[in-house]
């Protein structure tokens, strides 16, 4: 059977590392394990894996050092494995160039879904597939060329800023985008602390596109981190 790809697991806790490796091998991935950051950096460079699963709390260095090192030479997908208490670290990791994160404890289906999404984005990043002109999820449709948003066939009127936010999240569907990433995309890198304005815009967007804004179907909030657009089915 064909191998789905090689995944480097950088994790110092043996039980978690074994659990992940076993689950991945059962899904036809090849796995390589590193128990500290130094080993992770070396193996990433020598093996060029298709994806890295990275624990942030490593014995020798912070996992962030692995992201920094890898990002100097590659856009290969990196998914951070973090503890629930590491909210700040998660945001830093994403801003440093990690593609996504998964919070312990997690189940195998969630891990596999994240891996598939990150790999798909990795392929687009290296030019494997042109960006689509239309994005669809559920009843929501975005036409990037016409800058048109429809819900169940009816055109939704969004302000320019609202459209920019929705289009940016749709272009990166399935991936969490940090508040800072959204803010600098919409208002530029010099706009400090626009979190409040972003929240106001998001509330307006949800009123327009979600049936129940309190239980969003399309744009999810990752508390303390950012927003994630549901993926195309
Ligand atoms: Ca650890």
Image: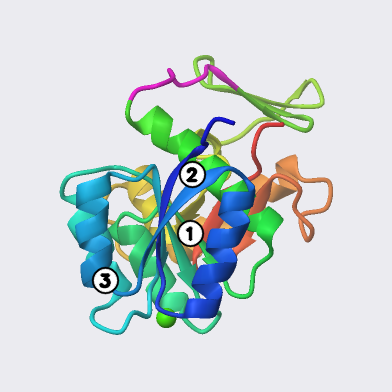
Q: Is residue 224 visible?
A: no
- For the magenta stretch, what is the residue range? 127-134
Dot label at residue 2: none
Which residue sits at x=27%, y=47%? 47
Which residue sits at x=64%, y=46%? 205
Q: In the image, 184: left or right of 3?
A: left
| Residue beneath disc 1 | 197
Task: Please identify, in this view, whether the residue under mark 1 or under mark 3 is nearer the observer.
Answer: 3
Marks 2/1 in contact by CB < 8 Å: the verdict is: no
Which residue sits at x=56%, y=63%? 20
| Residue beneath disc 2 | 118
Please, is residue 215 above or below residue 90 in the view? above
* Residue count near mark 3 (Cα–Cα under 10 Å), binned few <14, some 14–19, many ≥20: many
The spot of residue 99 in percent (x, y) is 42, 51
The spot of residue 150 in percent (x, y) is 71, 25
Q: In the image, 147: left or right of 182?
A: right
- 25 or 153, which lies in front? 25
From the image, give the main secondary structure of the stretch colored magenta: loop
Marks 1/3 in contact by CB < 8 Å: the verdict is: no
Name, please, the residue furthest toward the front.
1
**Residue 195 found in image quarter:** bottom left
Asked whether 130 falls inside the magenta stretch, the response is: yes
| Residue beneath disc 3 | 37
């Amino acid at each position: 059977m064909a191998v789905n790809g090689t995944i480097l697991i950088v994790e110092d806790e043996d039980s978690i590392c074994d659990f992940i490796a076993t689950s991945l091998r059962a899904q036809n991935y090849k796995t390589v394990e590193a128990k500290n950051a130094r080993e992770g950096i070396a193996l990433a460079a020598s093996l060029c894996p298709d994806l890295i699963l990275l624990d942030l709390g490593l014995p020798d260095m912070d996992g962030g050092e692995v992201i920094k090192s890898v990002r100097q030479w590659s856009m290969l997908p990196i998914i951070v494995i973090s503890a629930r208490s590491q909210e700040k670290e998660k945001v830093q990791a994403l801003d440093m160039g990690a593609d996504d994160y998964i919070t312990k404890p997690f189940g195998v289906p969630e891990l596999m879904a994240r891996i598939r999404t990150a790999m798909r984005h990795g392929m687009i990043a290296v030019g494997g597939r042109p960006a689509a002109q239309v994005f669809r999820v559920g009843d929501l449709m975005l036409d990037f060329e016409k800058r048109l948003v429809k819900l169940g066939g009816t055109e939704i009127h969004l302000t320019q800023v609202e459209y920019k936010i929705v289009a940016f999240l749709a272009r990166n569907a399935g991936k969490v985008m940090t508040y800072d990433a959204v803010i600098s995309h919409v208002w530029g890198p010099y706009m400090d602390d626009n979190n409040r304005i972003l929240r106001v815009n998001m509330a307006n967007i949800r009123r327009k596109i979600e049936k129940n804004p309190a239980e969003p179907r399309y744009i999810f909030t990752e508390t303390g981190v950012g927003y994630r657009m549901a993926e195309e089915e």
